[in-house]
Each structure stands twice: as C-alpha cells, then as structure tokens.
Amino acid sequence: MAIVNTAKRAANLSLNAEVLDRARELGMNISQTVDELLAKEVQRRYWERWNTDNEAAITAYNERVEREGLPLARYRSFAKGE
C-alpha cells in the first residue's frame, strides 16, 4: 500500500496541551509531523489487517511448500550444490 502526497484536507484534532506547547516551542511543524506519523500508522495497520485477512492462505501455501517443495525449485541455479 503506497501513500502518495495528495491535496491536504483540514481536520480538527484534540491534542495534549502540554505536548502541543512543547512541540511549538521546539519549532515543530505540527501538521507535517502528525501527517507523517499518521501515514506510518495507517500503513502498519493496513499490513496488520492484510496479514490477518490472509493468514489462512499464507499458512496453506507454506504447508504446501513444506509438503511438495517450491514449484520451480529445480530451476534455481543458486541452490545447486546444497
């Protein structure tokens, strides 16, 4: 899942007042910081959900590879000599 830079949209946030004050004292760009952190969290949760949603298929595939080996294993030149 790629998150690209698109147009910005205003949002109302309620933030810890002390943290907000300190961030401003440090000269932080609050919007940019929240945007970057939110994008990372969205990606993390997206992949967490994807893994959960696909857990059965991943398990079945891994069991099949364990049982039957990789479909094209005989063509893997770097694995020869093992």
Image: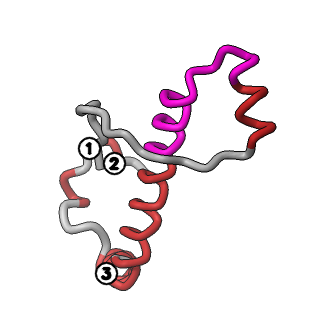
Q: Where is residue 57 in the image (x, y as percent from the top left)?
A: 31, 81
Q: Marks 2 and 3: which is nearer the front?
A: 3
Residue 19 in the image: above or below residue 68: above
x and y percentages locating residue 16 in the rendered image: 73, 46
In space, the residues marked 2 and 3 are separated at their CA atoms by 29 Å
2 relative to 81 in the view: left or right: left
Looking at marks 2 and 3 on the same chain, the residue that comes earlier in the sequence is marked by 3
The type of residue carrying mark 1 is Ser
Which residue is the site of mark 3?
57
For the residue pair 60 and 18, the one nearer the viewer reads as: 18
Quarter-wise, where is residue 27 in the image?
Answer: top right
Question: Looking at numbered disc 3 in the image, what kind of residue is underneath it?
Answer: Ala
Q: Are marks 2 and 1 in contact (CB under 8 Å)?
A: yes
Q: Mark 1 or mark 3, which is nearer to you?
A: 3
- N-terminal-most mark, 1 or 3: 3
Which residue is painted at 27% across and 35% down in the image? 4
Which residue is painted at 63% across and 20% down in the image? Answer: 28
From mark 2 to mark 1, how far is it between C-alphas? Answer: 6 Å
**Mark 2: which amino acid?**
Lys
Q: Is mark 1 on a helix, strand or loop?
A: helix
Residue at 29% over, 50% down: 1
Helix, strand or loop under label 3: helix
Which image quarter: residue 9?
top left
Residue at disc 2, secondary structure: loop
Q: Name the disc covering residue 77, or none.
A: 1
Other residues around mark 2 within 10 Å, as few (<14) / some (14–19) / many (≥20):
few
Query: Which residue is labeled 2 in the image?
Result: 80
Q: What stretch is highlighted in magenta?
A: 24-40
